[in-house]
Amino acid sequence: RKEVEQDPGPFNVPEGATVAFNCTYSNSASQSFFWYRQDCRKEPKLLMSVYSSGNEDGRFTAQLNRASQYISLLIRDSKLSDSATYLCVAQRTSGYSTLTFGKGTMLLVSP
Amino acid sequence: DVKVTQSSRYLVKRTGEKVFLECVQDMDHENMFWYRQDPGLGLRLIYFSYDVKMKEKGDIPEGYSVSREKKERFSLILESASTNQTSMYLCATLGPGSGNQPQHFGDGTRLSIL
């Protein structure tokens, strides 16, 4: 079983739609979680951290369910500029701090 | 803002060459990482370093080595380049502190081995 799994998509949505991505992780030692955004042929950039209590940043909401070992990202009122690949990331912080990346979910927002 | 600079955006080398990819960061971060990213495989960790002269193997270290002589610089070395090492290479850094510290990436180097 892969450590971090995501639906690769693509998710095709119209502008203004609400879209949700889920991600599961298998390593219960993972302690911190992030969503990164990666545009085509660019480096990944941090979108937001994911906190146990859930957190929101504008149109983006992230949730973490430790019992079920999944993370979600909700994007409301999608914009054309949201088109990208979204990477779910789990970080193990005991011992060496390393990140495990999911393969990403592609989002395509159309006019 | 953290700045992570990779020496080349695009690089073309020949099979058997020794290839150096350089990464420099300006934030005094202890931890530095080298990944490669391939279609359908996502980011895979090659090596990381948590201090000067220290290094640890990641998930796919074969065919690579690294050097960390100074805190700000982490070099990835392809000892004898092969075509299956054609890939996008990404360097990242991580500052101190426990938990909820994201990694910061360089722009990436697209390496082609002919």
Image (spheres, rainbow, N blue to C red):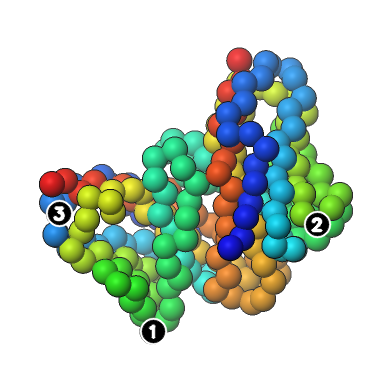
Q: How far apart are marks 1 and 3 (CA)?
A: 28 Å
Q: In what element is the residue under mark 3?
A: loop
Quarter assignment of residue A10: top left
Q: Kindly identify which residue carries mark 2.
A: B71
Specify whether residue A78 is in view.
Answer: yes
Task: Say the numbered circle drawn on residue A53.
Answer: 1
Specify whether residue B58 is in view.
Answer: no
- Residue in view at x 58 percent, y 63 percent: B1
Looking at the rendered image, the disc whose residue lies closer to the viewer, 1 or 3, is 3
- Residue in view at x 44 percent, y 38 percent: A41
The chain containing the residue under callout 2 comes to B
Q: Distance between the residues labelled 2 and 3?
A: 45 Å
Q: Which residue lies furthest to the bottom in this view?
A: A53
Q: Kindly identify which residue carries mark 3.
A: A15
Q: In this view, does A24 lie above or below B64?
A: below
Percent position of residue A75, x then y:
25, 64
Answer with mark 1 or mark 3, whichever residue precedes in sequence.
3
User: Given the image, on which type of amino acid does mark 1 rest?
Assistant: Ser
Q: In what element is the residue under mark 2?
A: loop
